[in-house]
Image: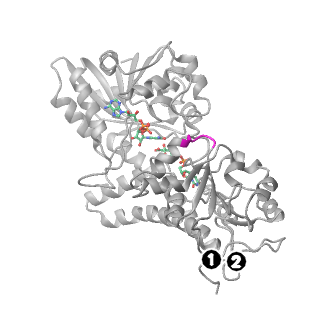
Amino acid sequence: MEVKKICCIGAGYVGGPTCSVIAYKCPDIIVTVVDLNKDRINAWNSKDLPIYEPGLQEIVEERRGKNLFFSTNIDDAIISADLIFISVNTPTKTYGVGKGRAADLKYVESCARHIAEVATGFKIVVEKSTVPVRAAASISNILSSNTKSNSSFQVLSNPEFLAEGTAVTNLIDPDRVLIGGETSVEGQAAIEALSNVYSKWVARDRIIKTNTWSSELSKLAANAFLAQRISSINSMSAICEATGADVTEVANAVGRDSRIGNKFLQASIGFGGSCFQKDVLNLVYLCEALNLPEVANYWQQVIEINNYQRRRFANQIIGSLYNTVYGKQIALLGFAFKKDTGDTRESSAIYVAKYLMDEGAHLKIFDPKVPRKQIITELQHPTITDCPEKARELIEVSGDPYTACAGSHAIAVCTEWDQFKLLDFKKIYDSMLKPAFVFDGRGILPHQKLLDIGFKVSVIGKHRENGGMFKSASSNNILLPSSRVLP
Ligand SMILES: NC(=O)C1=CN([C@@H]2O[C@H](COP(=O)(O)OP(=O)(O)OC[C@H]3O[C@@H](n4cnc5c(N)ncnc54)[C@H](O)[C@@H]3O)[C@@H](O)[C@H]2O)C=CC1
Ligand SMILES: O=C(O)[C@H]1O[C@H](OP(=O)(O)OP(=O)(O)OC[C@H]2O[C@@H](n3ccc(=O)[nH]c3=O)[C@H](O)[C@@H]2O)[C@H](O)[C@@H](O)[C@@H]1O
């Protein structure tokens, strides 16, 4: 079977870029991305796309109106498609059984019911969303229980591995494309049909074909392994700060072992983003449901270290500012969960801000891509504060980094935006209260230059000595106090 028309339900961070790239690489396929959210669809049809991804605007503008369409007419798109991607959100459940851990599949289920209701003829339904193992069985079940006499379905798993900020390059040149399906003849034919779409631009040997459950589990496993690496290096950063080691040197030495590899070893204030925490928790819940408590505990530790790292960074700031930040002004540089995106979902900056606000600090926040309203909404969320009015009084969103830093006691770098490396730090130093502190939670700033200017600098994973006070190799500028004294 040849796929000629694709419908994608869910015009989010995955559905939008993935289908734009399919439309770009397959001009003969008509791709329609649909969503219940009118504003989002309007934005996809405008100059201001709803998400920022380098290179995406050009691709959308090249194909939109030709073979790429964004619409709220979900029924029509389902009816005319040969292949339907389900690319809706699968957040952590906030209610009922599995609250705080299990994936909430209500949006996936509602898509399956919608497809069953309106589809006619044969459709390949592709699970693009990240789901627990065996979710495809539920989709199949809903589809087959509601099938009209003239419709039939094959369900595939085709998880997405793109990372935000590099979505377009990841989609154009993926490490692999994973397609899981039934081992039956019909299942294999459906796998082949989807594989033929990707093979228009992805080498055949990069398209991995597996059974459905392996595909679903591989997605959770990949995110768990990536998150585990970050928690591993962050756990090392704590040891580095308490000894004479430097986490950058350790990461380099460890990563040069080709069996380990050098990627994803950047110590930080903890991983953020909509998926790592959600998917690891999803895995933990799955293990518990499968009565595998030891495995569940193992993966739970990845989350515990991440929470610890966020808290540790905030505690370092508070400790260094003479154990109180009450009424003090702290500039947060960066609020997105990583550079090159405006996405703040589960950003570690939110938690650092929360811990500082809990101590009464005033925050001046600057991020090059996150709108002011979004920052305020995140910090007034009920999971972050029980008093939104008070939180509002403690937050000021600045339009540029210099305004954020002026009059501050300290700067905390929360996101690794390249532009922060090139700031005029002398100008910033002159505008701050003294002693002027910098807490580099991403290890990106020119530290020696900052020390030479007169800043007190603390870098995640860099050595503290003499009762926890830092000394630079070439200056006497004393940095972070810590809670412990070296033996
Ligand atoms: N954000 C990322 O970088 C990645 C996300 N994923 C996975 O992809 C899935 C989607 O994630 P995002 O795109 O980030 O989510 P998102 O929240 O940005 O987009 C999901 C969209 O689905 C729409 N939607 C929900 N139910 C619907 C329904 N019944 N009919 C029509 N539209 C509906 C929502 O309105 C929303 O616009 C999740 O399972 C996520 O875990 C996988 C890889 C990367
Ligand atoms: O399923 C998903 O949603 C996606 O999750 C991640 O992508 P993403 O969250 O967009 O971004 P990453 O580059 O993985 O960064 C995640 C977080 O880890 C942090 N990080 C990353 C790398 C590192 O060395 N250190 C570190 O702290 C980042 O700053 C960020 O907060 C995975 O990289 C993608 O493969 C996956 O498809």
Span of residues in magenta: 368-372
The x, y position of residue 154, in whole percent, is: 28, 28
Quadrant location of the N terminus in the rendered image:
top left
Q: State left or right for residue 34 relative to residue 114.
A: right
Q: State left or right for residue 304 relative to residue 252.
A: left
Residue type at mark 1 is Ser
**Front-most of residues 16 and 405:** 405
- Asked if the residue at tag 2 contacts the one at tag 1, i.e. Cβ–Cβ closer than 8 Å, the answer is yes
The x, y position of residue 451, in whole percent, is: 79, 65
Is 312 in the magenta?
no
Quadrant of the picture in which ligand 1 is shown? top left
In the displayed structure, 361 sits above or below 40; it is below
User: Dot 1: within a 10 Å radius of its alpha carbon, few (fewer than 14), some, or many (20 or more) residues?
Assistant: many
Q: Which mark is residue 482?
A: 1
Q: Residue at x 45, y 53 (%)?
A: 389
Q: Residue at x 66, y 47 (%)?
A: 417
Secondary structure of the residue carrying tag 2 is: loop
The x, y position of residue 438, in whole percent, is: 70, 62
